[in-house]
Image (spheres, coloured by chain):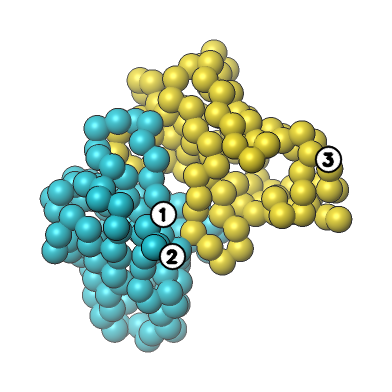
Chain colours: A yellow, B cyan
Amino acid sequence: GDSVTQMEGPVTLSEEAFLTINCTYTATGYPSLFWYVQYPGEGLQLLLKATKADDKGSNKGFEATYRKETTSFHLEKGSVQVSDSAVYFCALSARGGADGLTFGKGTHLIIQP
Amino acid sequence: DTAVSQTPKYLVTQMGNDKSIKCEQNLGHDTMYWYKQDSKKFLKIMFSYNNKELIINETVPNRFSPKSPDKAHLNLHINSLELGDSAVYFCASSPSLGENGETQYFGPGTRLLVL
C-alpha cells in the first residue's frame, strides 16, 4: 500500500539556520504531495503542496519540489524562526479523496533563539 | 468564521461509556473525514463521507459509527469506550472526492481521554 517516510525528530536548530526535513513516498499511480504543519495544541494546516512531478510548492519561506525519480518531497527553509517550531507532516493522496491522506509519522521541529 | 469546527475540544470519560464528537464545516464541501492521531502523533484515516455516503471504512472497530445528517456535518459516535481509544480525533473536509490535489481542511481536534 501507499506509505510516507519522513525523518523523525525532534530536530533542534538555532534561529536563522537552514532547514531540511526529508520525505520519501511509495504509491501507485501519480500521487499529489503535501506538507501540513501542526502548532502546539492546534489542528493541521496546509503548508504547501505539489500535484505533479517537478512542481515546486512554496509558502511562508518554505519550499518543496516533487521529485518523481527519487520519490521525494523534501521540505526546506533558508532561515528558520522560533515561530516555526511545530510538528511537520508529509502526506500523499493517490486516489483522490476516496482513500483520504496517507501521512508520515511527523517531524517535531524545535527552533532555539 | 471557523471553517471546520469540532465539539467538544476535550473529552474525559470512563471506560465502557458511549460518547459522541460533532463536526461541522461551513466551506460548502462535499467530502468529510475522520482521522485518529495517536499518542506518538501518527495520523490515520478512519472514515470518509461524500455527500452523506460512507466511502471508506479502514480497519476501525464497529464500536465507531460515523453519522452524517447532511453534507455539512459528520459526527462520530463511539460505543463501549476502551483505554486504547484515547487519542486526538480530527475532522477534515475537502471540496470533493475527485481530485488528488485537493486540500483537506482540518478542524482543531477533539482530545479524548478514557480512564
Cα separation, mark 2 vs mark 3, equals: 31 Å
Front residue of this view, candidates A76 and B78: A76
Residue that numbered label 3 is attached to: A17
Tell me, yes or no, whether the two marked residues, 2 and 1, touch with CB atoms within 8 Å: yes
In the rendered image, residue A104, in percent from the top left (x then y), is placed at: 52, 42
A94 relative position to B70: left or right? right
Q: Which residue occupies 26% across, 80% down?
A: B18
A29 relative position to A23: left or right? left
Q: In which quarter of the image is residue B89?
A: bottom left
In the rendered image, residue A2, in percent from the top left (x then y), is placed at: 40, 33
Kindly tell me whether residue A84 is visible in this rendering: yes
Residue that numbered label 1 is attached to: B106
Q: Which residue occupies 53% across, 36% down?
A: A48
The extreme bottom residue here reads B14
**Chain letter for the residue marked with disc 2 in the picture:** B
Front residue of this view, candidates B60 and A30: A30
Residue that numbered label 2 is attached to: B109
Q: Which residue occupies 79% across, 39% down?
A: A79
Q: What element carries label 3?
A: loop
